[in-house]
Amino acid sequence: MYTRHGGPVVSEWLAARLHNMIESASLDEFPHTLSTLRAYRGYFKRFPIPALLRDFVDEQGYPLDNVSVNDLTIEQRLTLGFLKADTECLQHIPYENNDLHSNQEGSTGSVAIIEPRDEKPFWESEQYDILIGHVGDTRILLCDATSGEVVTLTTGDHHPGNPAEIDRLRKYAGFVTTDSWGDDRILGMLATSRAFGDARLKRYGVSSEPDIMRYTFNNDKPAAFMVLVTDGITSVMSDQEIIDFIKQYKDPTTAAKKLVDAADQYGSEDNLSAMVVRLGHWGTRMPDFTHELRKYKLENSSMSNRQSW
């Protein structure tokens, strides 16, 4: 799931190529990726080797002796793929006056990989892992089939005011400003502190290094479905509202389309995209915790008021 800003080029480039970069990731390519990022200087001048790779490469990114460059975990492939995609997509964007660091197009992105452990297709599997690679403010949610409650699989949104991001950007905090709406922004321009692209803001800490998470699900921890959404939806609906909304529908495609329509009715003014993924316990009867809240919000939304005119 990708959310563009400044233009569509980066998000479209990622949609077409990121999955291949994750699949074909190799430590052989990491030295070039690392040197390209460090060339932005500033935050990246002393960019540390990501923790998942630290025991496999030297400080310049070259593989250590006796390390297999292709025998990688999925977590390592996600890390390498995200960083490589960031450096390569920048080379495919037109720049002002041929200045590599001038472009302001970018995209956030979150990836979910379902890894069955029982040799069944993922939509029937009862034992599987879900691996998440997360950059920015897209969000991946899961419905617990036992309780009907939401499980948020992504870590907190990567905003400059996020405590974890403040710690990461501490040396560059003077470049984080607050706009008239009270939102923290890098140099007053970008409301997310991790993203692909955004060449002009790279030196101030805008990184594509992903947060990586792995979750295990089985009969003792069943899931009904997973939903990937952009910030235009999460800006007007809570995580539990999103999960409860999806429960109403019999097929994932209809649920995703209706969710986007609902966020639009609630008055969202940002990117609206959703993907619903059916898992083994899709269709399980579960309580709707937010029905009255959604009904109230719809009755009082700006679009409903315009329609009543």
Image (cartoon, rainbow, N blue to C red):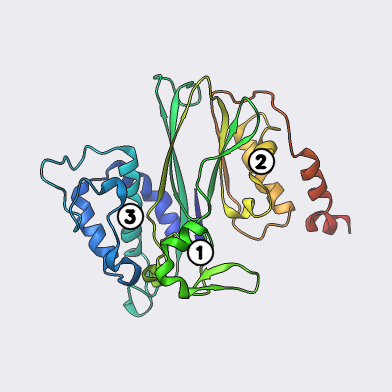
Label 2 vs 3, first from the N-terminus? 3
Measured along the vertical axis of the image, is residue 4 above or below residue 250? Answer: below
Question: Horizontal and vertical percent for residue 307?
Answer: 84, 55
Q: Is residue 69 left or right of residue 218?
A: left
Marks 2 and 1, Cα distance to the nearest angstrom?
Answer: 25 Å
Q: Quadrant of the C terminus?
A: bottom right
- Amino acid found under the numbered disc labelled 1: Pro
Judge the density around disc 2: few (<14), some (14-19), many (≥20) Cα neighbours within 10 Å.
some
Judge the density around disc 1: few (<14), some (14-19), many (≥20) Cα neighbours within 10 Å.
many
Q: Is residue 90 left or right of residue 190?
A: left
- Amino acid found under the numbered disc labelled 3: Leu
Which residue is the extreme one toward the left? 65
Label 2 vs 1, first from the N-terminus? 1
Question: Horizontal and vertical percent for residue 231?
Answer: 59, 54
Disc assigned to residue 75:
none
The residue wearing badge 3 is 83
Front residue of 247/167: it is: 167
Marks 1 and 3, Cα distance to the nearest angstrom?
Answer: 20 Å
Disc assigned to residue 240:
2
Residue lying at 52% horizontally and 59% vertically, measured from the top left: 162
Can you tell which quarter of the image residue 251 is in?
top right
Label 1 vs 3, first from the N-terminus? 3
Question: Horizontal and vertical percent for residue 189?
Answer: 52, 72
Marks 2 and 3, Cα distance to the nearest angstrom?
Answer: 32 Å
Of circles 1 and 3, the one toward us is 1
Which residue is the extreme one toward the right? 309
Residue lying at 64% horizontally and 55% vertically, measured from the top left: 235
Disc assigned to residue 160:
1
